[in-house]
Amino acid sequence: MEKGVSVKTKRLQPLIFWDKAAEKLLKWKNPTNFDDNVHDLRVLGKKLRALYYFFKPFLGKNFVRKEKLKVKKAMSSLGDIRDTHVSMKIYRKIKQDYPQLIFPKILENFLESQSHGLKQNQPYSNGKSLQVEKKHIKSMEIILSARERLLKKISGKPFEKKMIIERMQEGLSAVLDSMIKAKNESSAASFHEWRIKTKRFYYQLSLCLHRKSSAELEKVVKKFKQIEQYLGQAHDFHVLSTLVSTVDSKYVNDKEKKSFEEFLLLLNKFETEKEKEALELAEKLIGSGLEETITTLFNP
């Protein structure tokens, strides 16, 4: 034992690490920009859900069930706001990159109507926008309160290294199972489920990054983040494709119809490419023996 370190202090060192690590991971900066605020709130909600799973053995089933439900509802409200912004950005980027396509006027009007009142820094001046503001404020209250309850709940709780490693192994197994399912089914739903498991595991790994973490762990965390980003981009293309597919074809003239179909094909192509990139990186990472070495990557 190190000189000057008592048995009690030595035993509590992992406890101090997990308390501080969780607080750092759940840091809230409260951005003033509306888009950034919505985005960061959703990220915070996802981190909370990842930690509910990670600390589940210490939190109790009832606490986890109730808190997850509250956060899920708050995030669902924010999800619609986020999707409209992202869809509009993707549409404008494709329109810029493919000037040869003749986009139906109804399409842009449709997307604009979906995001009306949600543009960054736009004042809340009408009924719809006011409803969005109320949803945003309510969601913020729920998520930030949940953050405080979780930090309070895990404060002063001793966590054994063995238990933490088991949580990591279970998290990785969930990622692998969902990855295999996505590869076999090749459906948007299965890839989205894989993304959820990957993001959760990425946040759990991030929790383990501290001053004593290995360089190898940092590499693994970055790779899981990249996999999740590929899957997120694929999902965004799918969301936009699903959204524009609801546009009534009777409002699209013959000259625009071909471009409209090409636009949908482009979205499908981009979605498939990102899914492929995610699979290639994941299979390479898993093939390097991650399942066998996961227990040696960190030292809480």
Image (tube, helix red, strand yellow):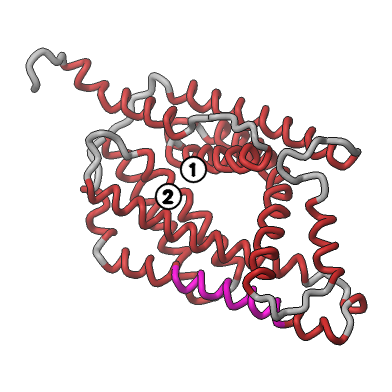
Could you tell me which residue is drawn at 25 percent across and 23 percent down?
Answer: 13
Taking the spot 80% from the left edge, 36% from the top edge, the residue there is 123
Kindly identify which residue carries mark 2: 201
Query: Who is closer to the viewer here, 165 or 42?
Result: 42
265 magenta-colored: yes
Few, some or many C-alpha atoms within 10 Å of disc 2 (few <14, some 14-19, many ≥20)? many
> Alpha-carbon distance for marks 2 and 1?
7 Å
Q: Tag on residue 50?
A: 1
Residue 147, percent from left and from top = 55, 28
- Residue 215 drawn above or below residue 263: above
Q: Is residue 26 magenta?
A: no
Left or right, 210 with reference to 69: left
Task: Write down the quadrant of residue 254 in the picture.
Answer: bottom right
The segment highlighted magenta reads 262-277
Q: What residue type is labelled 1?
A: Ala
| Cβ atoms at labels 2 and 1 below 8 Å apart | yes
- Residue 177: x %, y % from top left: 44, 64
x and y percentages locating residue 233 in the rendered image: 56, 62
- First reached walking from the N terminus: tag 2 or tag 1: 1
**Nearest to the observer: residue 163 or residue 6:** 6
Image-based side of 204 in relation to 187, left or right: left
Q: Is mark 2 on a helix, strand or loop?
A: helix
The quarter holding residue 65 reads top right
Is 298 located above or below residue 20 in the figure? below
**Mark 1: secondary structure:** helix
x and y, in percent, of residue 205 in the image: 36, 45
- Above or below, 278 relative to 5: below
288 or 64, nearer to the observer: 288
